[in-house]
Amino acid sequence: MTNPDNNFKNKLYDFETPLGSNVSFDKVMAARSKKPGMLWWKPAFLVVATLSVVSLAAFFMGNTAGNVHASENASANTDNNSGIVGAGKQNAQSEIKQPQSGDNEITQKSGSNDKQSENGSTVAASNATSTGNTNSANRASQSQSTKQEKTATDRVEINHQNKEVDNSRELDGANYRGLFAGLKRRNIKSEKFYFDNAISKAVSVEDRELLKHSTTAWSFEALVGTGEKSYNNFDSKKDFSISGNTRFAQYSLSGLYDLGNGFALSAGFNYAVNIGNGKWQATEQRNMINVSSHVITIVQPGLPDVVKTVYDTVHYTKGVQNTGNIEYQMTKMSIPIGFRYHFGSGRIIWRASGTVAPGLLTGSKGNLFNNSNFTQMDGSVKNKATLDARIALGIFVPMSTHLNFVAEPTLQYQSIVGKKWAGYNTFMTGFSVGLVFKP
Amino acid sequence: MFRVLSIRSEQQCKCIQTIGMTEKEIIEGCVREDRKCQRFLWDKYAPKLLTVSVRYCLSREDAEDVLMESMVKIFDKMQEFRGQSTLETWMRRIVVNTSINKIRATKITDTIDSETNNIGYTDEGFDAMNAKQLMALLDKLPIGYRTVFNLFAIEGYSHKEISDEMGIDEGTSRSQLAKARKALQEMITNNEHVRL
């Protein structure tokens, strides 16, 4: 009795299945000509491009809305001021044009009012009319005098209020065009900045009202990043060396919990694709024998010449190089845990972040290689633990009350636990863009 | 450690004389992207390789996809064939790996069951069956049983290699094999092969 397994092996090993119409040699050749190696990169690029376009569109739309909002607020402030003093509107405008602070400012404005006495009288008369006092010119004059004093006092308050407006106008300058123009709407000052806590300190009065609805400490971040590392380590003295580059595309979704003072904790989910392209070089040390020969003629007097062939044997070692292509693709999923820290220089909000991401290699194909050997055409490298670390420093641009744009250069280290994959366990520089949504 | 076959550029492929063509000539011709050599390789090995993929995949369509994908890899990577095994073995391994990647979504978890080891697995009944009947019999096995049985019994993989290949424990591999044998024996006992 034999092992029944042999029945299967003997009968099936060389069994040929007729090819169907769906497979043919020409189709294989057509598939090869398509060069699908880099196709995976296109979706990543598409996502980055889409995210950038959406971000810019949201930014410009938000910027337009912000300007309208600012003008409405300015109008409301002016109306309130006119209730305090009739000439306040003009005075406020003149102060905006000359935002010099201090007592001199008040004096100058008093002088300005004196020069505009005619106008002031009219206003005083108007105010007197509105209060029902229409009888006496002296009383009107006293009233005018009293109101002028009151006007001077109120102007101090107006000046104080308008200082904020002045700062806002200052931010309206040419330095705040383009990407950073979103900051001007919030009148962001040189303070620690992060979401509600910090924003409420930093933004102007009118914008602070808009932020009241935002009460949660949570926000959500979507990032897309790419990176690359090139290496040229060909060394004929080593048994095995590689040269090429490795790239990654990483998609990340995280929840951020605001701790205040610019700090936030983060946790989320990463999906990343890595590819590597290059060449391997194996140097095999071969023991070589070089045999050379030459002919000598021995001349002996009285005897016939003797012709001899002499062989010289030299043993030496020669390095023989073999090369081949490297091409692999790996996918992995990981859980990034880290922090974000936001700090401002007064005009730009910077964001520093650091994450550690334990994960799992979920797939691989191509030629995988370590420091001494490589595995050919093997998809077996999977379910291996990975550990990545990432730091980044970039800009954090508020685009609306809910949406913020993030762009940051990154430095990332990636590794497979327990494996020393050449070209994979390495530092890579990259760039990430994304959006932070604050409900 | 690495042996790359020497390629003499002046050597012309003698694919017209397909009969008597050596494996080395086929490889060298494919490395040179000689269409006739590639065609010869396809004609010679594609039906066998399709059998391999059919044994692993869940459907004929999947098997054909695997064959196409494998042949693209084979032609692309021919220059990296190291000659440590025969060309056919190397190609079969590629097809097996590609097939396993295709069916990888099917989760195989099991533990060894001592009961399933004690089965009356004999060649009685299998002897009389031809290749098509055996293929049909294998096709009725659950995917996990079938994959492990194919790898172990037909491809000659060890349980260690199977566990590495499929990302499962060796114990699971042994258990799947035992259950596959038991299921095959039961089909023979129940005369299911008659109805195939």
Image (tube, rainbow, N blue to C red):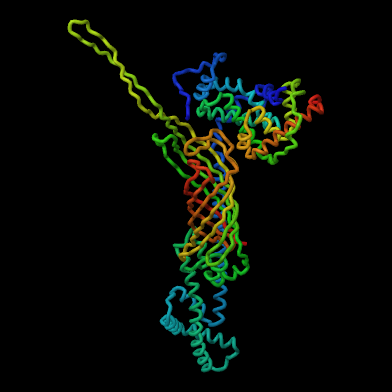
The residue nearer to you, when weighing B193 against B32, is B193
The number of numbered badges drawn on the structure is 0
The residue nearer to you, when weighing A398 against A73, is A398
Quadrant for the C terminus of chain B in the image:
top right
Q: Position of residue A33 (x, y in %)?
A: 55, 30
Looking at the image, residue A396 lies above or below residue B87: below
Looking at the image, residue A161 lies above or below residue A375: below
Q: Position of residue A345 (x, y in %)?
A: 45, 65
Q: Residue at x 55, y 62 (%)?
A: A264
Looking at the image, residue B124 lies above or below residue A243: above
Q: Position of residue B177 (x, y in %)?
A: 70, 33
Q: Is residue A180 left or right of residue B152?
A: left
The residue nearer to you, when weighing A382 against A54, is A382
Q: Is residue A87 left or right of residue A132?
A: left
Q: Position of residue B104 (x, y in %)?
A: 65, 38
Q: Is residue A6 left or right of residue A223?
A: right
The residue nearer to you, when weighing A435 against A254, is A254
Q: Residue furthest left?
A: A301
